[in-house]
Image (cartoon, rainbow, N blue to C red):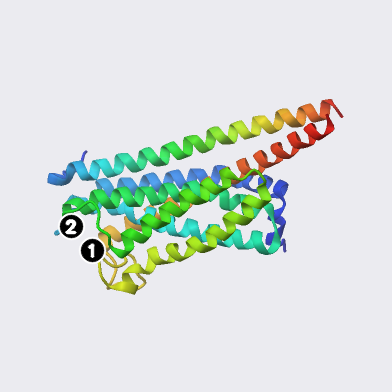
């Protein structure tokens, strides 16, 4: 059986993801579009929140992916620190803008949803605050990669930043449980059927979550390929300069 | 076809508009960057082969 470390070879990674990318992309578009159409057009209003409940199909999957993208970056960063595989460092770099965009969607849709429900766009509530800090970590992470010329040094430093930021990624997920205060309610999804949202909202929400996950995977494949090619180009140009 | 969104129409529609815009923008930027990186690498590799 092939080892997962085979994919640490850039050529093998590109060859494999080239085959997978069209399928994952098509599945992402199909799932996301059908989930959003189901949620937007074919679900009822909530008796308390009215039609704003339709924001759940964007807000919850985006928030989930904002945290999980950082967790994926954490795993990739640890692989870089321990095994020095360039592809893993580049995959972490590739995932950061996607995670930042997911965090931005969660923050914006949360503010738009919060205004009519809570009477305010923003509150320094534990979950909201930790999410904002997570967003700032994403920006800092991307800025650090761009600021350092040497790829290996950049990968080292951003990996350390990723480890530190993981605290806030976890806080974003569990802040409600830790402090049990603030405006934000508990998790919308739970293994306990009694706790999660009603089935009529739950099933389209699951489809949207699947769509966001597939979109994330497709974009990570594409962007990691880009990072690998850009790194190879920089290396060849440096060799050219040395040869002159 | 459009569902009745009542008094929260602006909130719901703006959430969808902003989110879809951000997703489409990231996808487009990622595809353009990918094409650019592929073309740049092809060019450097071609040059390398020419000069042995």
Quick check: A194 above or below A6? Answer: below
Taking the image as shown, residue B51 lies to the left or right of residue A151, namely right
**Residue A136 percent across, percent down from the top left:** 42, 52
Between the residue at mark 1 and the residue at mark 2, the CA separation in whole angstroms equals 7 Å
Residue A193 occupies quadrant: bottom left
Chain containing the residue with disc 2: A
Total residue callouts: 2
Viewer-proximal residue among A165 and A55: A165
Residue shown at 37% from the left, 72% from the top: A191
How far from the left and from the top, in percent, is residue B29? 49, 35
Q: Mark yes or no: residue A215 visible.
A: no
A238 up-or-down from A98: above or below = above
Q: Secondary structure at mark 2?
A: helix
Instruction: Indicate the quadrant containing the N terminus of chain A: top left, top right, bottom left or bottom right.
Output: bottom right
The residue sitting at 32% across, 40% down in the picture is B18
Percent position (x, y) of residue A183? 23, 63
Q: On what subunit does the disc labeled 1 rest?
A: A
The disc label shown at residue A183, or none: 1
Q: Earlier in the sequence, mark 1 or mark 2?
A: 2
**Badge 1 vs badge 2, beta-carbon distance below 8 Å:** yes
Horizontal arrangement in the rendering, residue A170 relative to residue A50 (left or right): right
Q: Quadrant of residue B5?
A: top left
Question: Which residue, given by chain and number where applicable, does mark 2 sit on?
Answer: A118
Residue A124, label in figure: none
Residue A183 or residue B36, whichever sits in front: A183
């Amino acid at each position: 059986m092939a080892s997962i470390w085979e994919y640490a070879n850039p050529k093998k990674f590109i060859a494999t993801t080239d085959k997978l990318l069209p399928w994952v992309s098509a599945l992402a578009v199909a799932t996301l579009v059908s989930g959003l159409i189901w949620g937007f057009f074919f679900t009822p209003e909530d008796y308390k929140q009215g039609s704003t409940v339709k924001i759940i199909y964007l807000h919850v999957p985006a928030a989930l992916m904002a945290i999980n993208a950082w967790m994926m970056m954490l795993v990739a960063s640890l692989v870089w620190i321990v095994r020095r595989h360039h592809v893993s460092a580049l995959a972490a770099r590739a995932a950061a803008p996607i995670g930042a965009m997911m965090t931005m969607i969660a923050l914006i849709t949360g503010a738009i949803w919060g205004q009519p429900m809570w009477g305010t766009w923003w509150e320094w509530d534990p979950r909201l605050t930790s999410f904002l800090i997570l967003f700032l970590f994403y920006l800092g992470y991307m800025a650090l990669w761009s600021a350092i010329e040497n790829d290996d040094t950049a990968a080292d430093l951003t990996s350390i930043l990723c480890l530190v930021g993981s605290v806030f990624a976890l806080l974003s997920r569990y802040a409600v449980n830790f402090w049990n205060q603030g405006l934000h309610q508990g998790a919308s999804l739970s293994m306990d059927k009694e706790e999660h949202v009603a089935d009529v909202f739950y099933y389209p929400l699951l489809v949207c979550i699947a769509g966001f996950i597939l979109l994330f995977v497709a974009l990570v494949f594409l962007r990691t390929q880009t990072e690998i090619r850009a790194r190879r180009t920089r290396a060849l140009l440096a060799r050219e300069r040395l040869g002159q | 076809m459009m569902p009745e969104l009542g008094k929260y129409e602006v909130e719901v529609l703006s959430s969808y508009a902003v989110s879809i815009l951000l997703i489409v923008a990231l996808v487009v930027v990622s595809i353009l960057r990918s094409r650019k990186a592929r073309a740049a690498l092809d060019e450097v590799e071609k040059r390398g082969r020419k000069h042995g």
